[in-house]
Every structure is written in C-alpha cells, then in structure tokens.
Image: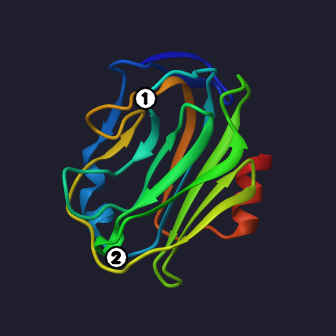
Amino acid sequence: VTYAAGRFGQASVFNGSSSKIEISGLSTFLASSSSKSWSCWVKTTNTTAPNRAIISDYGSGGNYNFDCYMKTTGVVEIVSATGGSTVFAPSTKIVNDGEWHNIIAVQDTTANTLKLYIDSVEEVSLSIGTGTDGVRSLYIGTYGAGYFWDGEIDQVRIYNTALNPNDVWLLYSE
C-alpha cells in the first residue's frame, strides 16, 4: 500500500489490483468462539467489478467470522460462515461516493448475531451459527486472494468484544 492524507492523519491507499495488508498474528483470536468487532473508515469512487474487500478473515474452506466487501453497486455486503452455515446481506447505504464512511462489524457470539453499521446506523443484522473458526489471517483490502480494494482505508481498529450501539456512535462521531 501507499499512504495519503486520510480521515485521521495518514490512510492506506489500495490500488485495486494487488495492494493488501495481512495480519497473521490474530489467528488464535479469530479462531476463538469469543465475540469480536472491527471498525474502519473507507473512501472510494470505484464502480467496477468484481466486489472490493474491506476487511475479511475469509479462508480457503471452513468457517469464517466475517467477510465484508463493497459490491459494484456501492453497497456493502457482510458474510459469515460461523458454524458452517453461510449467511449474508447487503446494506442499503451507498459508500462509493468519494466521501469517508465509517464501517463497523460486530460479531456477538452470546446473541449469535453479526451486525454491520455504516456511519453509526445499523444496516444489517444476521443470525449466525456457533462454533470456532479455522486458523487464518485477517486481511485489509482483500479477502486473501482477490477482490482488492480500490481506494483508501483508515483507522482500522479490532476489538475482542461485541461493540454496543453507543460504542458505534462514539467511534463514528470522534
């Protein structure tokens, strides 16, 4: 990745064809059955196929907690295969308008839900399965082998808890 002025200081700039960030040190955390959340800011004007990954722990086969990407229509879709059952749904909010948007995913293993927030508004709530995930990396700007993000991603934060709506609002309004 390269860097440019972002929402907060410097943002990572992804070229849409090969730029990515891989975090392998979170594999035990990602494989656990504990609640997890992540937050980031994104900015893009891309409207070309294929889908464009934002943050993902997608791996080859097996379960995964969340795979979050922008579709060519500009909506964000979130997918989970926790417990072996794949569920997914798109947002209604368009994010490829060249403005900064706060994206937050909350996997609550107590309530067995996965929620997607965009600009502090709950866009998607899915019922997810239970179980543990296979060991893999966390990816920013790709799902590991494609769907490269074309634009900027800033202020990525990873949490070992399910954020609540107040937490989401505080992250959006900072």
The residue carrying pointer 1 sits among few (fewer than 14), some (14 to 19) or many (20 or more) residues within 10 Å by Cα, namely few
Secondary structure of the residue carrying tag 2 is loop
Q: Which numbered mark, 1 or 2, is in the foreground of this view?
A: 1
Tell which of 20 and 129 is nearer to you: 129
Q: Which residue position holds label 1?
A: 50
- Image quadrant where residue 129 sits: bottom left
Residue for badge 2: 33
Q: Residue at x 32, y 20 (%)?
A: 18
Q: Residue furthest bottom?
A: 110
Residue at horizontal 25 percent and vertical 46 percent from the top: 24
The kind of residue on which mark 1 rests is Pro
Q: Is residue 97 visible?
A: yes
Using a 10 Å C-alpha cutoff, classify the residue at mark 2 as few (fewer than 14 neighbours), some (14 to 19) or many (20 or more): some
Q: Which mark is residue 161?
A: none
Image coords of residue 50 (percent x, y): 43, 29
Left or right: 123 in relation to 3: right
Residue drawn where x is 57% and y is 21% of the image: 46
Where residue 160 sits in the image (x, y, percent)? 46, 66
Q: Secondary structure at mark 1?
A: loop
